Image (tube, helix red, strand yellow):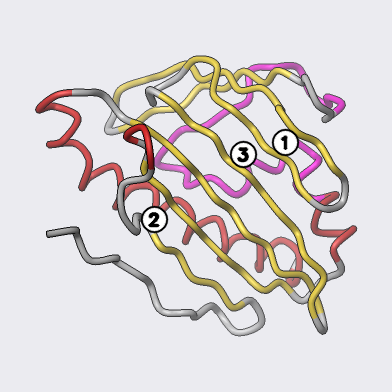
């Protein structure tokens, strides 16, 4: 029997409406899917520009991850840009390297893990104009380790990713609308 989707209700702090769906069902080739959607009442160009500034990633990541960008800032975001990070998952430090595989301002961009804590990580960010603001959609296709340890870790990974994206969406509201 396929696992039921764990779907957070569409909610938010008031002006941003968001939902996070941590895992609908396994995708082909063992990938898992996280989909997060948010309506942000700012125009698409402003929201995309916020994400185009790599240093903002540190600002929207939960402090418990001790996330930092190692690549010197500021950097030009474009297709082919390589970004090195450091972070801690469950207290274990990791190096993470991603490449911007697709760059289409102000519509979308995709980052792909080259090296890091996942077996695979493909994160597509899309920004769609909507009445009164922008609909922001994150789709993350990821694979974790194989075998029993991977299966045992999967529920924790799903919860952690959902938590990270909920934090991110609430922080975006605070930074863009209150700050």
Viewer-side residue, 31 vs 171: 31
Horizontal side of residue 97 vs 30, given as left or right: right
Viewer-side residue, 11 vs 100: 100
- For the residues marked 1 and 3, what is the alpha-carbon distance in whole angstroms? 6 Å
Report if the CB atoms under discs 1 and 3 are less than 8 Å apart. Answer: yes
Whether residue 33 appears in magenta in the rendering, the answer is no
| 70 w.r.t. 19: above or below | above
Residue 178, percent from left and from top: 73, 71
**In the rendered image, which residue does mark 3 sit on?**
58
**In the rendered image, which residue does mark 1 sit on?**
55
Q: Quadrant of the C terminus?
A: bottom right
Q: Of the residues tagged 1 and 2, which is closer to the observer?
A: 2
Viewer-side residue, 124 vs 26: 26
Please rate how many residues cluster around mark 2, counting C-alpha atoms within 10 Å: few if below 14, some from 14 to 19, many from 20: many
Q: Quadrant of residue 101?
A: top right
Q: Which residues are magenta?
A: 50-76
Please rate how many residues cluster around mark 3, counting C-alpha atoms within 10 Å: few if below 14, some from 14 to 19, many from 20: some
Viewer-side residue, 3 vs 172: 3
| 109 w.r.t. 48: above or below | above
**In the rendered image, which residue does mark 2 sit on?**
162
- For the residues marked 3 and 2, what is the alpha-carbon distance in whole angstroms? 17 Å
Residue 131, percent from left and from top: 81, 83
Dot 1 or dot 2, earlier in sequence: 1
């Amino acid at each position: 029997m396929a696992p039921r989707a764990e779907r957070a209700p569409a909610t938010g702090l008031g002006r941003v409406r968001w939902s996070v769906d941590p895992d609908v069902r396994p995708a082909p080739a063992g990938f898992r899917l996280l989909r997060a959607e948010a309506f942000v009442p700012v125009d698409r160009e402003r929201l995309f520009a916020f994400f185009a500034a790599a240093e903002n990633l540190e600002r929207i990541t939960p402090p418990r991850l001790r996330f930092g960008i190692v690549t010197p800032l500021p950097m030009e975001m474009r297709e082919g840009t390589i970004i090195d990070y450091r972070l801690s998952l469950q207290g274990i430090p990791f190096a993470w390297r991603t490449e911007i595989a697709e760059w289409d301002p102000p519509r979308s961009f995709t980052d792909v893990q080259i090296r890091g804590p996942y077996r695979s990580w493909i994160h597509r960010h899309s920004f769609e104009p909507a009445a009164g603001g922008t609909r922001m959609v994150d789709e993350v296709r990821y694979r974790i380790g194989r075998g029993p340890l991977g299966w045992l870790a999967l529920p924790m990974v799903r919860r952690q990713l959902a938590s990270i994206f909920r934090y991110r969406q609430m922080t975006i509201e605070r930074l863009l609308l209150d700050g």
